[in-house]
Amino acid sequence: MTQHVVIAGGTGEVGRQLLALLADRPDLAVRALVRKPGSLQAAPNLQEVPFDYEDATAYGPTLAQPCDLLLIALGTTIAKAGNAEAFLRVDRDYPMRLISALATTHPEAKVGLVSSVGADHPRGLYLGAKATVEAELEASGLTHVIGRPSFLRSSRKEIRVLEIAVDRLIAPLWLALGRVAFADSRGWWRWAPVHVREVATTLLDAALTLPPGQRRVLEGIDLHSGPINQWGKP
C-alpha cells in the first residue's frame, strides 16, 4: 500500500538527505513543497509542488490532499533571512501553519520534525522558535517524531569556517572519545556533532514505524548509532 509523504524544506541540509532516502522507496509517493519548480533532483516517486509559504490560505488546500506523513525540515539563519522577523517566519511560523493545517485535514497523519538540541530548555531566538513549534506539535494531538540534533555535519557547498573547523577537528575527536569512554552517556552524546545523513535516516525510520497515537523525541545517542560503531565516520 502506497503511503503519501509531504516534505517541507527539501532544499536544506537534512531535507536533501530525506529526499535521497525517500527516492529509494517506491512504496512512498512524495510531494515536496518548493518555492521554484526544478530546484530538486528528480525521482520517479517525487512530485514538486510550487508553494507560497507566505500565503496563509495555501496551507489547508495543499495538505487536504493525501498525506500520511509530513516531514518538516525548514530552517534558516538570521544572516540569510535578513532580520529576526524574517527568521521567525521560516523557523517558527511556517512549521506551525503546516502542523495546524495537517491536524485539521488529516488528524490521523504523522509528523517528523527537525528541531534542535536545547529546545526543551530554550534560550534565545533560535531555540525559542524551535520550542514554540514543538509545543504546537504537542498540542495538535498528531502522532509525531521530533529530532533534536546538536551541531550538524554535512558537505555543505557554502564555506563556513567555524563549521569546517568543528567538522574536521572537533567532531572526530569528540565522537572517537565518546565511543571509547562515554558510549552509554546520554549527556555526552546529547551535544555531540552528528551528520545530516544520520539525522535524516533515524528520523524517517522512526516516523514511518511509529504506531498511531504515539510521540517520540530523538536526540543524542538516539541519532548516533553510526559514529559510535564507526569511530566518528558517518
Image (cartoon, rainbow, N blue to C red):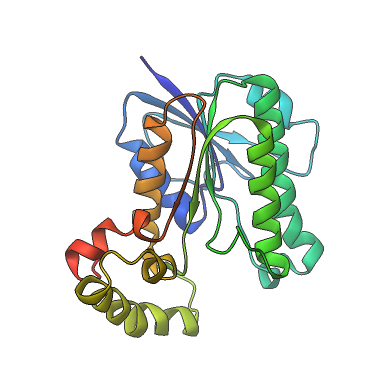
The residue under the point 47% across, 58% down is 13
**Quadrant of residue 19 within the rendered picture:** top left
Q: Give the quadrant of the N terminus.
A: top left
The residue under the point 18% across, 62% down is 229
Residue 133 vertical placement versus 163 (above, below): above
Q: Is residue 121 left or right of residue 213?
A: right
Q: Residue 179 placed where, x, y %?
A: 22, 71
**Quadrant of residue 77 within the rendered picture:** bottom right
Label count reads 0
Camera-side residue of 30 and 222: 222
Residue closest to the far top: 1
Residue 116 vertical placement versus 48 (above, below): below
Q: Give the quadrant of the C terminus.
A: bottom left
Q: Is residue 171 left or right of residue 50?
A: left
The residue under the point 61% across, 45% down is 36
The residue under the point 78% across, 69% down is 83
Q: Is residue 147 left or right of residue 99?
A: left
Q: Residue 183 placed where, x, y %?
A: 25, 67
Camera-side residue of 35 and 138: 138
Residue 13 vertical placement versus 177 (above, below): above
Q: Residue 145 placed where, x, y %?
A: 49, 41
